[in-house]
Image (cartoon, grey):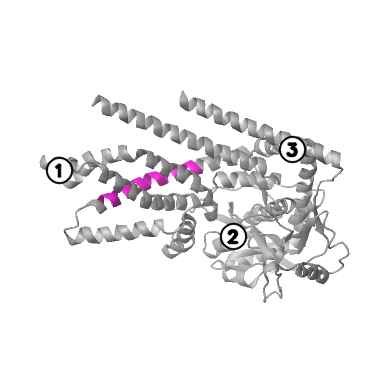
Amino acid sequence: MKKLNKFLFLALSMVMALSLLTGCSKDSEDSQLTTDNTSVSAEIIELDLTSEEYAFGVDKNQPELLEKTNTFISEIKADGTFDEICNNYFGDGTPVAVKSAVYDPDKDQLVVATNAAFEPFEYMEGDSYYGIDMEIAARLADYLGMELVIQNMDFDAVCLSVGQHKCDIAMAGLTVKEDRKEYVDFSVSYYNAAQKLIVKSNDTSFDDCSSVEEIEAIINSKGSGIKIGVQNGTTGQIYCEGDEDWGFTGFPAETIGYKNGSLAVQDLLNDNIDYVIIDSAPATCITKAINEMQTDSANASFARKLEKFKEIFVEQDGYKMVLRGLKNTLLIAILGLIIGILIGTVIATIRVIPKYKVLPRILNAICSFYVGLFRGTPIVVQLLVFYYVALPILNAHMTGVQVAIWVFGLNSGAYISEIMRSGILSVDAGQMEAGRAVGLSFGTTMVKIVIPQAVKNILPTLGNEFIALIKETSVVSFVGAADLYVAFNYIGSNSYEFMVPYLVMAIIYIVLVLIISLGIKLMERSLRKSDRRN
């Protein structure tokens, strides 16, 4: 009953917090009306900062695919198909949904790496992909007589995934660039693009600019005291930081990287950065959507944000991504914990074995190195090394979820080994002596007598480890796995509003932790009753 009361109190507190936010939003609106201040919006400076070409990045080990892709691009540009696809996003056409098949190495599939947060080239609604690149991908797969598989990942991992032969082709609004040619062979160009500067509507610094040079002079004059937002790994970042190959001198300003352009524009309007530089077409889509949201939030308060979230979550089947993300989060955490317990128990047992002989000393040294290695490096680094270094060396293929399960299991094993070792050492030494006295071997005594008692002692700490695993799964997007964070980031990117998605995500994590904590308490209570009966 006490646990139930705590849960109800927490739920009530969350409701009150949301109500308070709604009220604050309403008060803010009233304040705006009384002071006659207009809301600040995002504005694009209509001068092209760069001139670049988009192309597809093909696996260097597949020259035939490159040749066929080039032929395909030439054909769709010649027969008007490409113009028809572009009209779906820039004209009066209707965007076409593209579905991804499930990856199966035994099937003849075209595996496409993309970053589906780059409207109008690639974005998602529910389980469906949309965008110029995605429609081209679907037609290319049909042209090749293959099944289409789309793998959504961070932009700066797209070329790397193709370069390590995890995907066949990168289709993500890629600008042709020399350093990317180390990983992929570029197809012929299919689209001319440019970078655009986005500023707040009340910033008049660039109103009289008629050339790129004038824009650059103004930004340079502000020195290092300003911040410019960009999408990680894009030409915008290269332009701001400078690149000799492209002739970009860069700016003295601090460059701030974001996972997608909409986060950067939102941060601009939140006054956390001064400017945003991103690709022209996405800049138009993002500023239009966010400006509409700014107007909505000023006139209709927090309730309109909830309505927008509901639209993506329910009407566009965003809940399917959330359920899939929740499933992956739990799968990674639970299987990672099981693997960790198995590894940790073995290591802990080895480390408490008397070191009178050479073999136990060698095994102890190996286990100590293992524990130090996995406890001494961040889980993100371990994921990246395993996925982008170890698998290519071993010439093995695993999905992002499978990689996450094993890495989390190996990482957890290092921590659980120390937890288990402390639990074993907390068991009275007489228990081991008693087992050996009645003729049981060391191993049998450990398994049947010592370890069960140790588990009772460390159960709360194991629960904490499970909770930590649940929360740490938010980093698995680095290897292309879709967890809760990826699902809610998708909702935020498609609604161009991140407050409600992130609040709901936080509530789900809190509920998961409460459920786990309650389960651990019930297990402890059950074990205490068992002890009393014995």
Residue 433's label in the rendered image is 1
Residue drawn at (61%, 71%), measured in percent from left and top? 179
Find out whether the residues at labels 1 and 3 contact each other: C-beta distance under 8 Å. Answer: no
Highlighted range, magenta: 328-349
Residue drawn at (81%, 69%), measured in percent from left and top? 212
Residue at the spot of label 2: 158
Residue at the spot of label 3: 25
Which of the two labelled residues, at mark 1 and mark 2, occupies the earlier sequence position? Answer: 2
Side (left or right) of 78 relative to 465: right
Q: Answer with the quarter of the image where residue 358 lies.
A: bottom left
Is 344 magenta? The answer is yes
Question: Residue 142, relative to residue 292: is it above or below?
Answer: below
Q: Which residue type does callout 1 highlight? A: Glu
Which of the two labelled residues, at mark 1 and mark 3, occupies the earlier sequence position? Answer: 3
Residue 296 x/y as whole percent: 78, 40
Find out whether the residues at labels 1 and 2 contact each other: C-beta distance under 8 Å. Answer: no
Residue drawn at (37%, 44%), measured in percent from left and top? 338
Which of the two labelled residues, at mark 3 and mark 2, occupies the earlier sequence position? Answer: 3
On-image quarter of the C terminus: top left
Side (left or right) of 265 relative to 321: right
